[in-house]
Image (spheres, grey):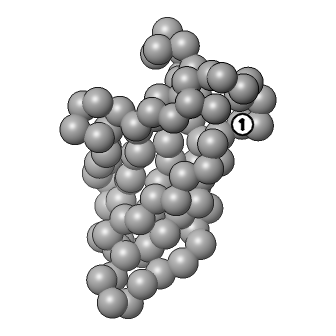
């Protein structure tokens, strides 16, 4: 799974990650993103996030995006539906 997350530039130091599951949230893993760009037009930063590469074919992965800046955490979970993709 490869996710490109675009976040508002709320602070110079920030962490963007995904929390994902392959078993309907019985367990989960976190993957931290790597900064890959900035847009002056809308003052946003882009982060590229990868899950581990062992996700088996046919598997359903659900995930939410977490953004931490200035001591505050923000979650994007697709309006409580989570994001979902089938491999």
Question: Residue 79 location in percent, x, y?
Answer: 22, 38
User: Quadrant location of the N terminus?
Assistant: top right
Question: Residue 75 location in percent, x, y?
Answer: 31, 43
Is 64 displayed left or right of 70 in the figure? right
Q: Report the residue at 38% width, 90% height from top.
A: 40
Is 57 displayed left or right of 39 in the figure? right
Q: Report the residue at 42% width, 84% height from top.
A: 39
Question: Residue 38 location in percent, x, y?
Answer: 47, 81
The answer to whether any part of residue 19 appears in the image is no
Q: Report the residue at 59% width, 72% height from top.
A: 36
Residue that label 1 marks: 52
Question: Residue 28 location in percent, x, y?
Answer: 54, 22
The answer to whether any part of residue 51 appears in the image is yes
**Is residue 31 positioned above or below 81 on the image?**
below
Tell which of 61 and 17 is nearer to you. Answer: 61
Tell which of 3 and 67 is nearer to you. Answer: 3
């Amino acid at each position: 799974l490869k996710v490109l997350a675009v976040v508002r530039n709320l602070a110079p130091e920030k962490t963007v990650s995904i929390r994902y599951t392959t078993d309907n949230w019985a367990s989960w893993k976190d993957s931290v993103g790597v900064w890959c760009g900035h847009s002056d037009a809308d003052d946003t930063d882009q982060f590229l996030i990868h899950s581990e590469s062992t996700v088996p074919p046919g598997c359903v992965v659900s995930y939410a995006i977490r953004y931490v800046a200035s001591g505050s955490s923000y979650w994007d979970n697709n309006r409580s539906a989570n994001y979902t993709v089938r491999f």
